[in-house]
Image (cartoon, helix red, strand yellow):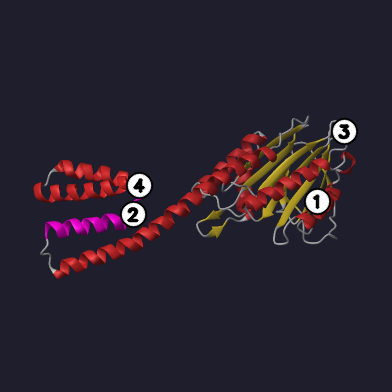
Amino acid sequence: MENTKLDLDNYRSLLKEYLLTKNETALYQAEQFSKLSMQHNISPEEIIHVHIEALKELYPDLTQEVNDSLNFLLEAMISYGLAYQEFQTLREKQSELQSEISVAASMQQTLLSTVKPEIKGLDIGAISVPANQMSGDYYHFVTDKEDDTLGIAIADVIGKGIPAALAMSMIKYSMDSFPENQRNPSAILENLNRVVERNVDPSMFITMFYGLYNPGNETFSYASAGHEPGFYYHGDQDEFEEIEARGLVLGATDQATYRQFERKIKKNDCIILLTDGVTECRIGDRFIERDEILQVIKKYIQLPAQEAVEQVYKHFERLQEFQFRDDFTLIIIRKEV
């Protein structure tokens, strides 16, 4: 407290010196005083109060109007000081929260990381970019060394932030715990649906598409839990077909069942899976049409799969002026032989 009083007395001296001599050194010392005042937690209204007292000492015959205006300034600074303290407290809390979110985002990347597999006869490309620090999208590859099958999961949480990240972590580790003889898409979704229904808040739903490629008979089996429809590219015809599969979102009811579909995969054909962050891209205030999305994908479909998904992403990134409103996830799988 003694240091604080000494500093305030010093302010009086600096003000008097400047008003009487216009000495620039006093201005510099006033700047240093401001920094010290912050360190000693001296409020703005305290400084204004000392300023007024110093003026009255120097000019005891101040007019009533000047005195009233100084009192008005003091009252204004009292309100300002309280508001500023609240603002600083909010900034500190925001900084702490931002730090926690950064840690959570880093943990999410580690927990949900998946390795893009090298599968003979397949060219695989995948990209997933969050709109914010925490992603509500998720994709995962599951390989079986015994029969060389490839499982592909792509999901989207209806909801964002840390709760979505926790839900996705639960999905991933639930999938990893399933026996290898229960990799059929319909069984996967039915098991996950029960997990979500029991453990996730009723206000949060998860859409998911799960497919299984079997190189032995060159078939792709799949099922969907309310997920954004993907596309099938016919290489010989250079045409796209929507992959139709219907089903309830995960967590809606514990009695949900999921119909499984199957199709033969030919050489140079592609399976294209995505989330609604791709289909809900905007041009100004208008959502892009699915035909427009296909035109962009078609432009790059002949490139290596990884290069293709990256080029499509860059196209939409430029289209939206480098500001996505939703997480962007796109997978392209091409049969080469």
Q: Which mark is residue 147?
A: 3
Q: Which mark is residue 192?
A: 1
Looking at marks 2 and 3 on the same chain, the residue that comes earlier in the sequence is marked by 2
Looking at marks 1 and 2 on the same chain, the residue that comes earlier in the sequence is marked by 2
Instruction: Please rate how many residues cluster around mark 3, counting C-alpha atoms within 10 Å: few if below 14, some from 14 to 19, many from 20.
Output: few
Type of amino acid under label 4: His
The answer for how far apart the CA atoms under marks 1 and 3 are is 23 Å
User: Between residues 257 and 218, which one lies in front from this camera angle?
Assistant: 257
Instruction: Please rate how many residues cluster around mark 2, counting C-alpha atoms within 10 Å: few if below 14, some from 14 to 19, many from 20.
Output: some
In the rendered image, residue 236, in percent from the top left (x then y), is placed at 74, 40
Query: What's the magenta bit mostly, secondary-structure-wise?
Result: helix
- The reply to whether discs 1 and 2 touch (Cβ–Cβ < 8 Å) is no
Q: Residue at x 77, y 58 (%)?
A: 251
The answer for how far apart the CA atoms under marks 1 and 2 are is 57 Å
Residue sitting at the far front:
2
Residue at disc 3, secondary structure = loop
Of the residues tagged 3 and 4, which is closer to the observer? 4
Residue at disc 2, secondary structure = loop
Magenta residues, start to end = 37-59
- Quadrant for residue 264, please give it: top right
Residue 246 visible in the current orientation? no
Q: For residue 67: magenta?
A: no
Horizontally, residue 177 falls left or right of residue 6, namely right
Which residue carries the number 2 mark? 43
Residue at disc 4, secondary structure = loop
Residue 1 visible in the current orientation? yes
Q: Residue at x 78, y 53 (%)?
A: 224
Instruction: Please rate how many residues cluster around mark 1, counting C-alpha atoms within 10 Å: few if below 14, some from 14 to 19, many from 20.
Output: many
Which residue carries the number 4 mark? 40
Of the residues tagged 1 and 2, which is closer to the observer? 2
